[in-house]
Amino acid sequence: MFNKYPADDATRALTHRKAPQQKRSQMTVQSILQATMELAEAEGFLSLGTRRIAERAGISPGSLYQYFPTVEAILLTIYEETASRVTKKFRAKMLSIMEAPMETVGQKTLELLLKEYEANQLILHQMVIERPQLMMTPGAASLERLFGAGVRLYFSQFSGLNERDVERVSFFLDIVVIGSLRSYLSERPLQLSRKAFLDDLVKVTVSYVRSQNWKVTA
Amino acid sequence: MFNKYPADDATRALTHRKAPQQKRSQMTVQSILQATMELAEAEGFLSLGTRRIAERAGISPGSLYQYFPTVEAILLTIYEETASRVTKKFRAKMLSIMEAPMETVGQKTLELLLKEYEANQLILHQMVIERPQLMMTPGAASLERLFGAGVRLYFSQFSGLNERDVERVSFFLDIVVIGSLRSYLSERPLQLSRKAFLDDLVKVTVSYVRSQNWKVTA
Amino acid sequence: MFNKYPADDATRALTHRKAPQQKRSQMTVQSILQATMELAEAEGFLSLGTRRIAERAGISPGSLYQYFPTVEAILLTIYEETASRVTKKFRAKMLSIMEAPMETVGQKTLELLLKEYEANQLILHQMVIERPQLMMTPGAASLERLFGAGVRLYFSQFSGLNERDVERVSFFLDIVVIGSLRSYLSERPLQLSRKAFLDDLVKVTVSYVRSQNWKVTA
Amino acid sequence: MFNKYPADDATRALTHRKAPQQKRSQMTVQSILQATMELAEAEGFLSLGTRRIAERAGISPGSLYQYFPTVEAILLTIYEETASRVTKKFRAKMLSIMEAPMETVGQKTLELLLKEYEANQLILHQMVIERPQLMMTPGAASLERLFGAGVRLYFSQFSGLNERDVERVSFFLDIVVIGSLRSYLSERPLQLSRKAFLDDLVKVTVSYVRSQNWKVTA
DNA sequence: CATGAATGAGTTTTCATTCAT
DNA sequence: AATGAATGAAAACTCATTCAT
């Protein structure tokens, strides 16, 4: 797919080959991950290759293959770590302010999401764009539906809600929010300040929810 | 970036090498474009290569290079054609219903946009996802800001509007709408019907504009 | 099998990739075949590799792959050519002297066989020893049962013979003769002159046939 | 030859590096030999490698190198053990029936030989086919001339024989018998039963000897 | 103009072997 | 003695690109 002479995807697990057992090998794995990110930062994810990564990491090609069978596997490892960290943060934030007014909830969660996307732009944004197939790997703990999950979590504190409505709304918001975030990060238009974008996105999502006219009881 | 041994990007324009002036040449170019799309349909845009395209088009590698210096150039040609067609349609539609109520305008234009994205999914969606760098080519008449342009066009019929406000709103809507469309096409969630998605997107955009509380005069 | 990173045998035909159409490419193919034999002569068939063959042939690796997908394919081409030539010669010889006394027939055919094995020792003997898998390729027109076929041909001129007996005798002779030839060529014992070996082999085979006490009618 | 980066053959004896003197070491060596045979049984001798052998034997690569410098060394050890066992058996058998009629001697010794070749097919046949160079190692106590040695032993009980004739006959029989056995094991033709093959081989060899018309005195 | 043979740098991947721990 | 991490040379193979015919 991405690589020219890719290993047979079926026979090759996209994960570690063997778990590093000694200190030295832990360092090797770290150096691989770091070298990968450095290269990606400099020239994107499409031209990454095992040889260059190994070279940059200061190890031999053979060493790299002791731990990762594929460039894919390295990227997946990197992505999953970041994704799960962000997911946890997001969940925690949502749980901690769920009882605040909806405006506040929307504002805080979107703020967090945007901040994390910005802080991990290379991984969460660029990597996803340049290596879309990666996210389709079964088991890739994607962030795609993170916001929707948050919405569902939020509404779970109320009763009297039609479950299908909640589903529909969550999906719609997920699509709009994640899509907008992506577009925004891709373009970073000068005419639209970060604050303006965020405020309007909050406004739009909150007013969308309000427009559902749900009768809820805490 | 995409190719392994790409020609020096600086010295190589990403366009036709020479404009085909004879009938035979025109046919050759057509066969190249078609072969490219057929291959892309079958196996995506990432594995495309000059050799295979030439083979499928029934010409020799050397011939292909008479018309296109690069796979990118072929893809760009294909994209631009579609993009400009859709842009024209969109402009025409907007002009034809600009005077209708805002709900109608939003509904019709978004409907058209979604329909075109669906009809040209391979080019407008898949190609953009798998070859994101393509769109960054200077001069690529992207669709990215098509909706924003429509919004600006719409508001140009009113006077008394602050220009910067219009810019801000246009950009925001562009980002939300295009991002949402992309997300929707990527995911095609079962829980959210096409109609529901479209209706809600109209609702959200229109109510966003209304919330600006603009005093306008026709 | 032999190579370290062999192509998937199933998906890769062991034959020419494309038929050379121009004079130049005919020469290329010839240079590949010749370079292969030169290398094999110098260092055996086990260490052959595409890179070294190409280098010796004075062409690029890529060129080699235009005509042969594998070292195997090259060897097979070489073997088949020689095998079919020898087979033809042997058949012709047998047909031309079938009516002579059995001693003469045995002597002449074994003489021919030994001569050909000696003349093409590298291909018919060494290659078969070092690359035994090659002969198992379906369609490899092996010489393995050449002598047996000759025996059958010889007896076909008589009637009154039990077919199964003929089969048994042919197989036995094939095994003994081919096996002995191989052993002889492998060892080339000084204590046993070429002439002595040949004479005794004739004697043994003829007397084996005579001992069957077959009543035959021409 | 076989290995990619073989140690310099001159500086590296193809034997044990050090003789295992402790119990644990003995067990390690045994586990190496066994692991090698298991792998060979499963996938032949060509794809054997130190790493995989070590892994299967449950030891580290480094440990393997304490006992064997090379895969060849392991194979040679295995071969020699079997070869010397068979040689001993064969000698013993020959000595025990030397005085019986020649038909009996031929029948019994060939029977034994075939049986041993069948019982140790993997080592005596397959290994020799797939790793022919092994047998050329100086000092490899090959079975190649086992039958000839037996013939010489047999005739040593008679006097009045021309020594060079005995040599010639022994060599010839060696070549025919070993060659035939190999061919037979390679092909295992359905048209020729084991018994038929053996009987005819006895017949042929005995009658060959008889045809020498030697005047012998016990 | 078109052809297709040739190029060759560059990729992924393996595995015998060493050596610090 | 044993371990296992690291090595690095070499293999197979591809494909954008050129150029003589």
Image (cartoon, coloured by chain):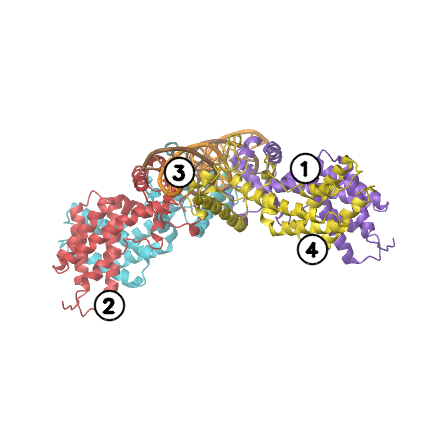
Chain colours: A purple, B yellow, C red, D cyan, E orange, F brown
The residues bearing labels 2 and 1 have C-alpha atoms spaced at a distance of 86 Å
Q: Secondary structure at mark 4?
A: helix
Disc 4 marks a residue whose amino acid type is Arg
Q: Chain of mark 2?
A: C
Residue assigned mark 4 = B194
Q: Are marks 2 and 1 in contact (CB under 8 Å)?
A: no
Residue assigned mark 1 = A187
Which of marks 2 and 3 precedes in the sequence? Answer: 3
The residues bearing labels 2 and 4 have C-alpha atoms spaced at a distance of 78 Å
Whether marks 3 and 1 lie on the same chain: no
Q: Does any portion of residue C155 appear in the rendered image?
A: yes
Q: Chain of mark 3?
A: C
Mark in the foreground, 2 or 4: 4
User: Which corner quadrant of the image does residue C28 belong to?
Assistant: top left
Residue assigned mark 2 = C163
| Label 2 crowd (10 A; few <14 / some 14-19 / many >=20) | few
The residues bearing labels 4 and 1 have C-alpha atoms spaced at a distance of 27 Å
Disc 1 marks a residue whose amino acid type is Glu
User: Which corner quadrant of the image does residue C186 belong to?
Assistant: top left
In the image, B1 versus B199, the foreground residue is B199
Mark in the foreground, 3 or 1: 1
| Label 4 crowd (10 A; few <14 / some 14-19 / many >=20) | some
